[in-house]
Amino acid sequence: MKNILVKNIRKLSGLDTKEKAILLLLGTHFEGETPQLSELVKYSKMDQRIVKEAIKGLKKKGFKVDIKVRKKAK
């Protein structure tokens, strides 16, 4: 699997700061992995809502971003 940053290098200029930060983490620290949302929050030192919003924005702009989201117990 190729690095997400290299595969999408032409799309990087259209991203905002929080999307770039999450994409950088996915392309370096979590390269080739499917991290949990809590891991992204921990390493980015961002609020969970901000990370979710950034991931949603990346998906909307055509980036293939896969993360694990833990389901809440009922």
Image (cartoon, rainbow, N blue to C red):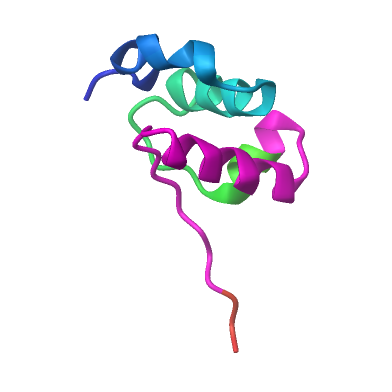
Q: Is residue 2 above or below residue 47?
A: above
- State the residue in front, 71 or 18: 18
- Who's the residue at 58% across and 29% down the image? 22
- Who's the residue at 59% across and 76% down the image? 72
Q: Is residue 22 above or below residue 28?
A: below
Image quadrant in which the N terminus is located = top left
Within the image, what quadrant is residue 54 found in? Answer: top right
Q: Is residue 46 above or below residue 48?
A: above
- Who's the residue at 48% across and 27% down the image? 26
Q: Which residues are magenta?
A: 42-71
- Who's the residue at 53% across and 72% down the image? 71
The percent coordinates of residue 56 (x first, y second) are 53, 45
Residue 40 in the figure: left or right of residue 23: right
Image quadrant in which the C terminus is located = bottom right
Within the image, what quadrant is residue 33 found in? Answer: top left
The percent coordinates of residue 14 (x first, y second) are 52, 18
Residue 29 counted in the magenta span:
no
